[in-house]
Image (cartoon, helix red, strand yellow):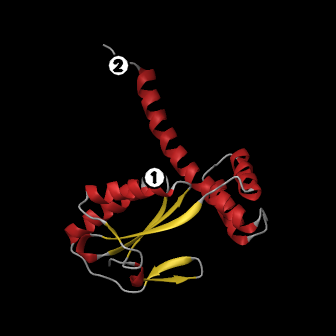
Amino acid sequence: MAGHNKWSKIKRQKEKSDAEKSRVFGKLVRTISLEAKKSGGNIKSPVLRAAIEKAREANVPSENIERAIRKGKEGESNLEEIIYEAYGPGGTALLILCLTSNRNKSAQEVKHVLTKYGFDLAKPGSASWAFEKKEEEWTPAVSVEISETQGEVLSNLIDSLCALDEVEDVLANAK
């Protein structure tokens, strides 16, 4: 009767929840580090303060937050923001916002997920025309109407892309 004890079940559930927490914590810490680098470690910077508050809401330990700020301030962090562009189901334009220290790795991970769903990366500028950048946020300038089945495929694609560690956000111009 191997695998039928209470501890095995608890262990598997804990592993699953810990993996999810680790993924979320990693994204938040990378964001804090990048914003600390931009602001020079000034904790009064509104963007850095918002990133810290978001991390505290997710219960990120304060040691991790302080370490991320220190890394960003001292320049140990070599993170950069990258925007990949693609077209999804029904001709929807996708902007994939990444925060990475390894440009090649993140490009290959994004390409792999897109290929799995039958799509490819687009050339820079070919999908960004469908979006406007207002202050720090991208918003769709043009919307595309898609069918319900295409919407499900798009939703699955976005979920798969967001599951990648280095992907911060995925924007689509679908209705």
Label 1 amino acid?
Answer: Lys
Residue at figure coordinates x 68%, y 59% from the top left:
52
Tell me the quarter of the image containing the N terminus: top left
Q: Nearer the observer, disc 1 or disc 2?
A: 1
The quarter holding residue 143 reads: bottom left
Q: On the rendered structure, is 37 left or right of 153? A: right
Q: Residue at x 33, y 15 (%)?
A: 2
The percent coordinates of residue 174 (x first, y second) are 33, 77
Vertical arrangement, residue 5 with respect to residue 56, above or below: above
| Place of residue 22 in the rendered image (x, y in percent of width and height, measured from the top left) | 54, 44
Q: Report the side of 14 relative to 119 (left or right).
A: right
Q: Is residue 92 above or below residue 166?
A: below
Q: Where is residue 95 drawn, in percent x and y?
A: 42, 71
Which residue type does callout 2 highlight?
His
Q: Is residue 175 above or below residue 121?
A: below
Q: Tell me the CA gap for discs 1 and 2.
A: 40 Å
Dot 2 falls on a residue whose secondary structure is loop
Q: Quadrant of the C terminus?
A: bottom left
- Of the numbered discs 1 and 2, the one sitting upstream in the chain is 2
Q: Residue at x 67, y 64 (%)?
A: 35
Q: Residue 88: which quarter of the image?
A: bottom left
Q: What is the x, y in percent for residue 122?
A: 34, 71
- Left or right: residue 91 versus residue 134 is left
Q: Tell which residue pokes out farthest to the top in this image.
A: 1
Disc 1, disc 2: CB below 8 Å? no
Name the disc covering residue 105, or none: 1
| Mark 1 surroundings within 10 Å by alpha-carbon count, few (fewer than 14), some (14 through 19), many (20 or more) | few
Pick the residue in front: 52 or 69: 69
Q: How many marks?
A: 2
Residue beneath disc 2: 4
Q: Residue furthest bottom?
A: 141
